């Protein structure tokens, strides 16, 4: 059992509930969903009925209104079982949070109850063929047309793009980055499945083509010019936060699998767990899981308080958790030997999923440069005598 | 009414040198900000200066300079006080 500090009784109870559901209703099926490259509709319905898709939505709009730590625990326990399901929480939550934060009264009243109960599944359509981490290279365009807008462009790597009912989509309006809420059934919008991806294979990636796609004026979310710096940036922060917690779950899953295997497997007349080089792997996994969990909790507490330091705490948590998860997954496969390379073994899925975690919501290298910049910011504040110091 | 300019200037110190930055200087136009700046600025205005930033406040003119942010906070504060 993982060491946990500082959880309230309610948070701990919620975590136990998330863990039980993930252990019984997700983990046994995760490899099958991975092979089939899809989550079953019945599962999405069951997941939504438990309120897990409404975690980021305030209660007054029908959501669960989870505090940041509890939302993180949901992502940890879900990510421990299946990163694709955790990805659903992430992208659906990003759309929900964007509508709750920046939506008009009409947009909130229309979309949030539907998103909260899973009647509408949301997805985040930012990446393009020429714009991944470099979001400023956004090329999709929007033009005014009467009382609405016409969208043109291509979107790539849209998680749950195949399944989503609503896209939070970004395009240039009068050359200003702007956010739009685009229903999947909009005329001129087509979605193609992305197949044979490395990891999170059940996350139903889609490629979107917008050809003279007309949307009403009410599709505009936030103000033109603030699509990236406010709407997308805020949503991506939630994305990074939930991915970081999901990586804690991945770390724990790698540790769980390796502990069980090393306990039972014998080589050279001794259990694997008695080999010191295997003990090194286990020690690193256990330590990284605890450290990543604490970084995530720190980010959650700061986010809950609305503290601006939560932004950088989240980057640090995501950076550490995702890089540690990949290292742990590589070690888990190594400890399992040939068994770990087999297509029906969860650890090979963990390894593929963990690599994806190092790329999404800000690639590792982007995290590193941003965290380094932050260290200089803290130094500048300390020098000015205004901050807590570097 | 509270003068927020010193607090705003202190916040901006994290991101760029403010010694030569005038109250009216447009730091977006000067190119001083990075991609996370606006989000942190909104959090700062909301949590340190106590003014809730709504969708309709998301105009560059409201955030482009020390004076503009100060004016936004004063305007929001007077509305909150009146309600």
Image (cartoon, rainbow, N blue to C red):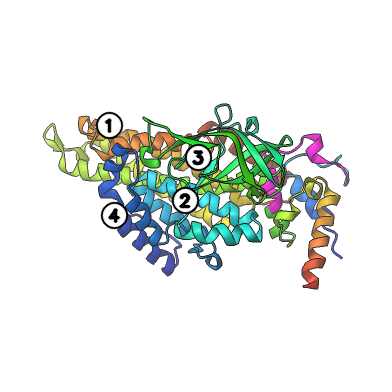
Front-most of residues B59 and A83: B59
Q: Earlier in the sequence, mark 4 or mark 3?
A: 4
Q: Quadrant of the C terminus of chain A?
A: top right
* Residue density around tag 3, few if under 14, some if 14–19, many if 20 or more, within 10 Å: many
Q: Which residue is mark 4?
A: A25
Question: Same chain for the residues at labels 3 and 2, yes or no?
Answer: yes
Q: Earlier in the sequence, mark 3 or mark 2?
A: 2
Magenta segment includes B38? yes
Which residue range is magenta in the image? Answer: B24-42
- Which chain does the numbered disc 1 sit on? A
Q: Which residue is mark 2?
A: A121
Disc 2 secondary structure class: loop
Q: Which residue is mark 1?
A: A334
Disc 4 secondary structure class: helix
- Which chain does the numbered disc 2 sit on? A
Q: Is residue A322 above or below residue A131?
A: below
Q: Earlier in the sequence, mark 1 or mark 4?
A: 4
Disc 1 secondary structure class: helix
Front-most of residues A278 and A73: A73
Q: Is residue A73 above or below residue A280?
A: below
Image side of residue A139 versus residue A329, left or right: right
Q: CA distance from mark 4 to mark 3?
A: 29 Å
- Which chain does the numbered disc 4 sit on? A
Q: CA distance from mark 1 to mark 4?
A: 28 Å
Question: In front of the other: label 4 or label 2?
Answer: 2
- The spot of residue A15 in percent (x, y) is 38, 61
* Residue density around tag 2, few if under 14, some if 14–19, many if 20 or more, within 10 Å: many
Q: Which residue is mark 3?
A: A319
Question: In front of the other: label 3 or label 2?
Answer: 2
Identified at 40% across, 51% down, the residue is A76
- The spot of residue A239 in percent (x, y) is 52, 46
């Amino acid at each position: 059992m993982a060491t946990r500090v500082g959880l309230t009784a309610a948070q701990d109870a919620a975590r136990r509930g998330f863990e039980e559901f993930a252990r019984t209703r997700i983990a046994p099926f995760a490899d099958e969903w991975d092979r089939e490259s899809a989550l079953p509709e019945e599962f999405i319905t069951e997941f939504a009925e438990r309120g897990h898709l409404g975690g980021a939505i305030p209660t007054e709009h029908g959501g669960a209104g989870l505090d940041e730590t509890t939302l993180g625990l949901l992502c940890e326990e879900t990510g421990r079982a299946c990163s694709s399901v955790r990805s659903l929480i992430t992208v659906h939550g990003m759309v929900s949070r964007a509508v709750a934060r920046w939506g008009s009264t009409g947009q909130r009243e229309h979309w949030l109850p539907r998103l909260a109960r899973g009647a509408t599944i949301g997805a985040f359509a930012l990446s393009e063929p020429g714009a991944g981490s470099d979001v400023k290279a956004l090329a999709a365009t929007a033009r005014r047309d009467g009382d609405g807008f016409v969208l043109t462009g291509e979107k790539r790597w849209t998680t749950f793009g195949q399944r989503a009912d609503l896209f939070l989509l970004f395009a240039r309006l009068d050359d200003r980055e702007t956010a739009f809420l685009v229903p999947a059934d909009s005329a001129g919008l087509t979605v193609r499945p992305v197949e044979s991806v490395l990891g999170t294979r059940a996350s139903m990636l889609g490629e979107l083509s917008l050809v003279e796609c007309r949307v009403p004026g009410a599709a505009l979310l936030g103000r033109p010019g603030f699509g990236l710096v406010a709407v997308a940036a805020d949503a991506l922060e939630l994305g990074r936060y939930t991915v970081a917690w999901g990586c804690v779950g991945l770390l724990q899953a790698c540790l769980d699998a390796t502990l069980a295997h090393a306990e039972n497997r014998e080589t050279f007349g001794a259990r694997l767990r008695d080999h010191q080089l295997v003990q090194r792997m286990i020690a690193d996994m256990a330590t990284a899981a605890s450290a990543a969990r604490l970084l995530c909790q720190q980010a959650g507490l700061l986010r809950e308080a609305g503290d601006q330091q939560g932004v950088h705490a989240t980057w640090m948590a995501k950076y550490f958790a995702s890089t540690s998860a990949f290292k742990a997954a590589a070690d888990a496969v190594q400890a399992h030997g040939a068994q770990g390379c087999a297509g029906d073994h969860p650890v090979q899925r963990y390894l593929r999923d963990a690599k994806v975690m190092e790329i999404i919501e800000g690639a590792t290298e982007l995290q590193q440069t941003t965290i380094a910049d932050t260290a200089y910011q803290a130094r500048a504040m300390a020098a000015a005598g205004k901050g807590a110091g570097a | 009414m509270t003068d927020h300019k010193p607090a705003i200037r202190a916040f901006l110190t994290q991101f760029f040198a403010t010694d030569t930055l005038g109250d009216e200087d447009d730091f977006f136009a000067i190119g001083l900000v990075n991609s996370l700046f606006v989000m942190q600025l909104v959090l700062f205005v909301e949590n340190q200066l106590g003014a809730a930033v709504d969708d309709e406040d998301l105009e560059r003119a409201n955030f482009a300079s020390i004076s503009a942010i100060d004016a936004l906070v004063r305007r929001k504060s007077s509305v909150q006080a009146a309600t």
